[in-house]
Image (tube, rainbow, N blue to C red):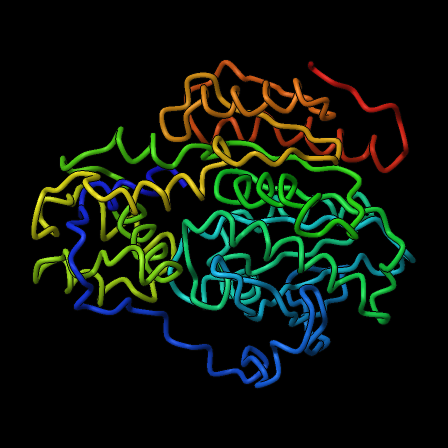
Amino acid sequence: MAVLISSIVSLGLLGLPAQADPLYPTPDPDLFYSAPADLGALQPGDVVRTRKIDTGLYVGTEGWQVAYRSTNSQGNPVMGVTTVLLPAGVKNPPLVSYQALINSLGTQCNPSRSLFNGELQDAVGAMLPIGRGWAISLPDYLGPTAAYGAARLSGMMTLDSVKAVQKVADLGLANSPVAIAGYSGGGMATAWAAALQPTYAPDLKLTAAVAGGIPADMEEMALALGFDPHPGFGLAFAAAMGLEREYPNRLPISDQLNQNGLWFREFTHDACRRFLLFHGAFRSAEQMAASKSLMDSPEARAVLRENSLRYFPGVPAVPTFIWQGRFDTLTFFNPVAEVADRYCKAGAPIDFHPYEIAEHMTTAVAGFADAWNYVEARFRGDPVPTSC
């Protein structure tokens, strides 16, 4: 999630009508991922279908996949999928919805696939809750079009995935306490889910939320990045393409690409994180863009703010643990600190932990031990700490 949005700045929006449609990922050929014609007749969080799966290398677990109805950024019904791993022999375990590091554009990069094809970068860390006797659910929170960068969408997909999992009787999780967790892009999905829950899913009871490395102001991230070659350009470009998929009528980014940019769009439209990083390293927006109209579009800025936690007025009701590197140059500290302060002033149960660390993923390692201990304490019913 390091350089999610720089391409929106760098590719620029002139306010012209879109001539190049968004390039969506290749649909998964498995019919399990196909939305039914009557999806709109269901409510958010309703179960579409389920299946038991082989959990492969994840020894000591039983696995299921759950397809469910959710909502996209335009308020339209979309179908989501989440993968549930249950610790073998444990009845009625607590449930953790873990929003993994996806940072990708292809459907095969989603956790329902990447857990088993080697693409999920934090697969080992995601399994830590299993070792504590907890069930874990890993939603494909970027939605059916792999809309990388669409933060509000990811929050709604996360909340609906939990509601759906609790409705599957075979899983035995209907009355389990629920925590949501994630870092970086997964932290963004988690933090948005926590903030949206009181209004989007007021009937869903959450016990804890833990989120770190949160990209809390996507507009600021965009303005901080420019046209120079960048080691993370592949992820920035992917985020621009992902947001165009989610907002095709408001972000006609493909219309601003030159021939090289259109080629790179085709080359990466099904790509996962490692492919994007390798092939995008030290490329630049100047190589891809037909113009340099930096953030000239009020609509572009509006979309970025709509997906920035800093500007969302909602406040979590769930006890929330947030951690952030004070010197993180990828996901900035000040917007997260500002969000935490606003939550405190609103009376939310927030425990905010700054770490004197600059490197983004080092902060993840430093904070997750405390985050899981925070979750365990909430599951025990211990008094809720606050940094306010």
1 with respect to 77 (left or right): left
Whole-percent x, y for residue 374 in the image: 75, 29
**Which residue: 63% across, 47% down?**
126
**Quarter of the image holding residue 60?**
bottom right
280 with respect to 82 (left or right): left
Which quarter of the rendering shows the N terminus? top left
**Quarter of the image holding residue 247?**
bottom left
Whole-percent x, y for residue 309 in the image: 50, 35
**Which residue: 92% across, 58% down?**
91
Question: 94 above or below 358?
Answer: below
**Quarter of the image holding residue 193?**
top right
Which quarter of the rendering shows the C terminus? top right
Number of marks drawn: 0
Depth check, front residue: 31 or 361? 31
Whole-percent x, y for residue 10 in the image: 18, 42
Whole-percent x, y for residue 212 in the image: 56, 32
Question: 24 above or below 151?
Answer: below
**Which residue: 26% across, 28% down?**
224
Question: 57 above or below 363?
Answer: below
